[in-house]
Image (spheres, grey):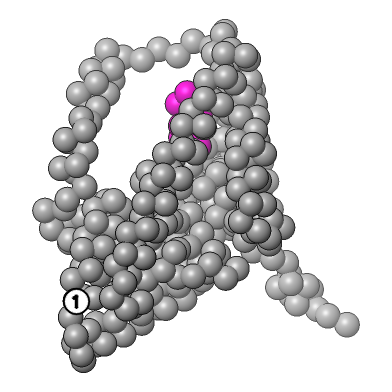
Amino acid sequence: MPSAFQNLRRISLTAWIMIAMVIGVFIGWLWPEVGMALKPLSTIFLRMIKSIIVPIIFGTLVVGIAGHGDDMKRVGRLALKSIIYFEIVTTIALFIGLAAVNITKPGIGVQIQASPDEGEKLASNTPTGMGFLEHVVPTSFFDAAAKNEVLQIVFFSILFAVALSQVKGRPKEIVLAGCEGLAEVMFKFTAIVMRYAPIGIGAAIAVTVGHSGLGVLINLGKLILTLYGALVVLVLVVFVPVALMFKVPIREFLAAVREPALIAFSTTSSEAALPRAMQAMEGIGVPRRIVAFVMPTGYSFNLDGSTLYLA
């Protein structure tokens, strides 16, 4: 007869995360001060996750590009297809978001005061086209890594991989082996960090509810329902047809993205979910070269959820 400890070990990580989220809601609701005091636990989890991003992107992207021969045309085709897909889907998400807010009008009755300083700061930080291109190029790899500038890391990693693909013989093999080893270690590192995920995510939910209370969720309930309704429409209209078109096993895919989705939802950070999402996609058979290129660039260019929200 299995012991209670063995039964607990059989519970999946996804289930533990959901249990922790429910506990976090109750702690933040019933004991707001206790919920707020749990913030360091949430911060520790986010810091551990963010520490994974740079090495895992660099290692997987270099191996994905330079480790597959000298066929740079294949890399170019992958980049072109990815950017076209990002542009089309993001545009569709924008139209769905605009349609949703014009039909439901969720902002009516909700008054949020913004200071003039915040408006001026937002206007001054709006990037221009040339400013965006300038920002993509890092002044230093280590500076970009310290600031977790994903797009700059992707840019540097691609150039590094292209340069490495032009190197012949043992030097190339040594660097490739090092990058492949780095990627493998970081995936194991991700698995270790994810064991702490229920505690970090439960604490994040407790902090959010403890700070804002359940009342803010009720007052903004129409906005939340509109947003998630629009997300459901986007999934049904775009993602499901795309999955069927390319014969993606939908159930297997949904099972793979449950944990990354819960992490992103509870921490309000898609950045926190990126390492686990990359690991999950490799787990269902997506080639590493595709995962390494498409997911980090999609993180920067294919912000469908943010587009729906901002619309």
Residue 143 vs residue 223: left or right? left
Nearest to the observer: residue 180 or residue 15: 180
Question: Quick one: which residue is furthest to the left in this view?
Answer: 139
Query: Residue at 42% across / 52% down in the picture?
Result: 81
Question: Quick one: which residue is furthest to the top in this view?
Answer: 109
**Is 261 in the magenta?**
no
Q: Is residue 56 visible?
A: no
Find residue 21 and report its horizontal and vertical position in percent: 63, 48
- Residue picked out by circle 1: 166
Find residue 156 and report its horizontal and vertical position in percent: 21, 60
Residue extent of the magenta highlight? 305-311
Report the amino acid beneath label 1: Gln
Secondary structure mostly taken by the magenta-highlighted segment of the chain: helix
Query: Residue at 26% across / 87% down in the picture?
Result: 173
Query: Residue at 65% across / 58% down in the picture?
Result: 247
Find residue 265 and report its horizontal and vertical position in percent: 55, 44
Q: Quadrant of residue 215?
A: top right
Find residue 60 and report its horizontal and vertical position in percent: 37, 70
Query: Residue at 61% across / 56% down in the picture?
Result: 246
Nearest to the observer: residue 268 or residue 242: 242
